[in-house]
Amino acid sequence: MRIATWNINGVKARLEALKTWLQQEQPDVVVLQEIKSVDEAFPRSEIEDLGYNIETHGQKSWNGVAILSKLPIEDVQRGLPGDNDDTQARLIEGVFSVEGGAVRVCGIYLPNGNPVDSEKFTYKLAWMDRLIAYCEQRLSLEEPFVLLGDFNLIPAPVDVHDPEEWWGDALYRPESLERFRKLMNLGFTDAIRAVTDEPSYTFWDFQAGAWRRNNGIRIDHLLLSPQAADRLEAAAVHKDVRGWDKPSDHVPVEATFAF
DNA sequence: ATGTCACTCGTTGAGTGA
């Protein structure tokens, strides 16, 4: 089974690239972030025509997440529990029946958090605290579980072209990293880091010639429960997609499993 | 040194968020 994440940065603006990539790669499950669409406006039929089931959790203008899958999507969960006042659409989860059991797939769009002297940063940290609590429960199920998406978090110096320039940003500073480490220490395996030590950027800003200069960062991740990590066969960043026409500023990241 | 995009409101650009 091939499971992928892609921050699409506007599903309607990127529909051609999305369709091309789905047809070319034929992933089994894809989670999207920043669909920037309400559920009613999601281009369902064009993606269904490619053989995918769709579940969305959208909102107007910003954020919004979705699951595309060739398999039926069961047990859909929308939104991160723990704060009834949080109206931002940033989490969608589904369960897929596979040979010998099931795999649970949770797609997230973790808050950016900039600027750090604003309530956006406190929201990011609180969201990460809630995510840790959520994952503690999920991991206690001791089943294949994949937490993937745009984490808006740079895990290590190798994951950023210029660590000194980025240090202090909401994506790369102590309060954010402390929570990411706490999340990882629940027992997750970083799929890309399980297969390579090389820089593996997943995002290049639209500005300042970032793509041309390869000024990237690695912020899109697939984190695997022990039961998922045991079945990991491969993982890859689809870097070439950043060079397509009308690209997103993020590229797809995928992992292949023996289930 | 500089450099971009999508979306909304509501209209021919400005404001916002990333």
Image: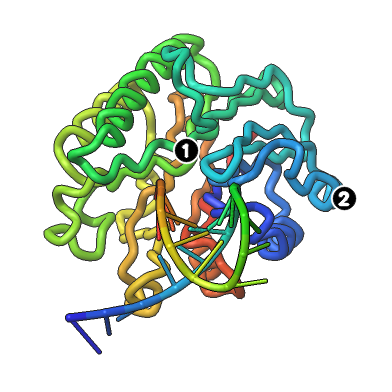
Quarter of the rendering containing residue A107:
top right
Q: In the depicted view, which residue is nearer to us: A221 or A60?
A: A60
Q: Residue at x 28, y 47 (%)?
A: A154
- Residue that badge 1 annotates: A109
Residue type for callout 1: Tyr
Neighbour class for label 2 at 10 Å: few (<14), some, many (≥20)? few
Q: Are marks 1 and 2 in contact (CB under 8 Å)?
A: no
Q: Residue at x 67, y 64 (%)?
A: A17
Q: On what subunit does the disc labeled 1 rest?
A: A
Instruction: Locate the N terminus of chain A by quadrant.
Output: top right
Q: Element under label 2? A: loop
Q: Position of residue A185 (x, y in %)?
A: 28, 24
- Residue that badge 2 annotates: A49
Q: Element under label 1? A: strand
* C-alpha separation, residue under disc 1 versus residue under disc 2: 26 Å
Residue B15 located left or right of residue A239: left
Report the coloring of the rendering: rainbow
Q: Which mark is residue A179?
A: none
Q: Position of residue A197 (x, y in %)?
A: 30, 54
Q: Position of residue A141 (x, y in %)?
A: 50, 10
For the residues beneath circles 1 and 2, the answer to whether they share a chain is yes
Neighbour class for label 1 at 10 Å: few (<14), some, many (≥20)? many
Residue type for callout 2: Asp
Residue A164 located left or right of residue A248: left
Q: Position of residue A27 (x, y in %)?
A: 68, 48
Q: Residue furthest left?
A: A164
Instruction: Locate the C terminus of chain A by quadrant.
Output: top right
Quarter of the rendering containing residue A86:
top left
